[in-house]
Amino acid sequence: MAPGGCAPHHWLCKGTMLAGGVLVGFSVLSLLTYGYLSWDTLGSSLEETETSRAKLGEEPEATAATSQPHIVFILADDQGFRDVGYHGSEIRTPTLDRLAAEGVKLENYYVQPMCTPSRSQFITGKYQIHTGLQHSVIRPTQPNCLPLDNVTLPQKLKEAPGKYFEHYRSINNINRRRYAAMLACLDEAINNVTLALKRYGYYDNSILIYSSDNGGQPTAGGSNWPLRGSKGSYWEGGIRAVGFVHSPLLKNKGSVCKELVHITDWFPTLITLAEGQIDEDIQLDGYDIWETISEGRRSPRVDILHNIDPIYTKAKNGSWAAGFGIWNTAIQSAIRVNHWKLLTGNPGYSDWVPPQSFSNVGPNRWHNERVSWMAGKTVWLFNITADPYERVDLSGKYPDMVKQLLRRLSQFNKTAVPVRYPAKDPRSNPKLNGGVWGPWFKEDEKKKKPGKIKGENKQKKNKKKTSQKKGQSLHCRLHLAGG
């Protein structure tokens, strides 16, 4: 996937197209991203071509049938729950409103409160506690990335638009083989784009998925009203996302899905739709939810681990005692099981912020509902179905439910991998890299082999033998950060 116009530290672009077929996945994205063509130009060319064909008495060719759908996934940055027309926003989004109305609105859909974990979960299908990215975001100055042993969604989809590589296995030179595969892909992609633009034939077999990566940031103009909290918090305002699926392939068009859906679910869902293979040894946290979305069936998902961050322990009053000896409530964590949601530690900014409650000239507030921090409180329980705005804390009324969810947190925590959050590296300074942000981390491996010194060559003992591999820039460094 080409990063296109993303900022240097963004690995996963704000709007991303993935494809079961080559059409959307390669050519359209590349052509539009790099500005070789515009929709106006393409539209004009199409009209002229169709007019010419009509004059010649030719009929438009039928689009080649394929069971693999073209997948378009749009990931919007920092869009708040209320920042879409069909959620009552004053912001006009007629296209999103129409596509959502004709598709399936995901009204119980969750992401993460920050971009790095959301994007990592999207492309791996795993909770961040299973990739080491459970704390904060990847900073440009950190020698950090998604662990390279994680297979990603683009890789799996590539194994599915991979026939091109397989066709050239007879070429022994791996670089030449890749080049041949890419050229074959390019040739077919251009042909597919040309045919598609002439016939408008790709829509009937397409799936468009829209998702925000985390809640809105009120200080930057975002709104999650009437949900509590904002970007960076584990209140609903930070994690309940704008999401919908639009596709002629949906069986229940124009419907609303209130089943639990999480961003990790796209990994297995899209791979299955693309007729790819999911290895049995991959421990995914996501579920295939296509039948839930398309047919209105019950979701296979009954819980969501929003996160466990063992580094973020700012709740000074948290303790094992407050967690009934089951859980240290100083740890920032949040979990949803069926209707119930439990939060521990410091969940983050907890106000309810009505639209336009922050001034564009400063941090002045008006009609902003403030929440006084209750000293000593480190556990909250809500029935999200009955109370989606998290206004009634039920932790004192239902201690048994609190204990049950704390045990579930403890079970999840046993499967967590160590946190990946290295210190800043001074080598990341742009001044040391041509004055720009770019790949800067180099891995040097110096291996010295002592070698046996024999009598006949002792005279050479003072000569140094060095074996050094050239540092390789980690161009594959997966910068999922975005704040």
Image: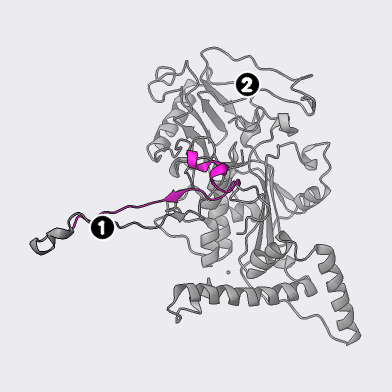
Q: In the visual, does 118 lie left or right of 325?
A: right
**For mark 2, does the 10 Å Cα neighbourhood hold few (<14), some (14 to 19), or many (20 or more) residues?**
some
**Residue sitting at 91 percent across and 85 percent down?**
55
Residue extent of the magenta highlight: 426-453
User: In the image shown, does 332 or 16 lie closer to the viewer?
Assistant: 16
Write down the residue under mark 1: 465
Q: Residue at x 74, y 75 (%)?
A: 194
User: Is residue 446 depicted above or below 321 in this figure?
Assistant: below
Tell me the quarter of the image containing the N terminus.
bottom right
Position in image of residue 415 (x %, y %): 39, 40
Q: Residues within 10 Å of mark 1 (few under 14, many from 20)?
A: few
Q: Residue furthest right?
A: 55
Mark 1 to mark 2 CA distance (whole Å)? 71 Å
Q: Is residue 143 visible?
A: yes
Residue sitting farthest toward the front: 459
Which label sits in the foreground, 1 or 2? 1
Q: What residue sits 81% from the left and 63% below the top?
A: 39
Scheme of colours in the image: one colour
Q: Compare marks 1 and 2 and give the one earlier in the sequence.
A: 2
Q: Quadrant of residue 108?
A: top right
Q: Amino acid at mark 1?
A: Lys
Q: Is residue 376 left or right of residue 73?
A: left
Given the image, on which type of amino acid does mark 2 rest? Val
Q: Name the dominant secondary structure of the magenta segment.
A: loop
Residue under label 2? 392
361, above or below 256, in the image: above
Residue at (45%, 29%) from the top-left corner?
Answer: 311
Q: Nearer the viewer, residue 322 or 332?
A: 332
Q: For residue 299, say whether it is visible.
A: no
Residue 354 coordinates in the image, percent (x, y): 76, 26
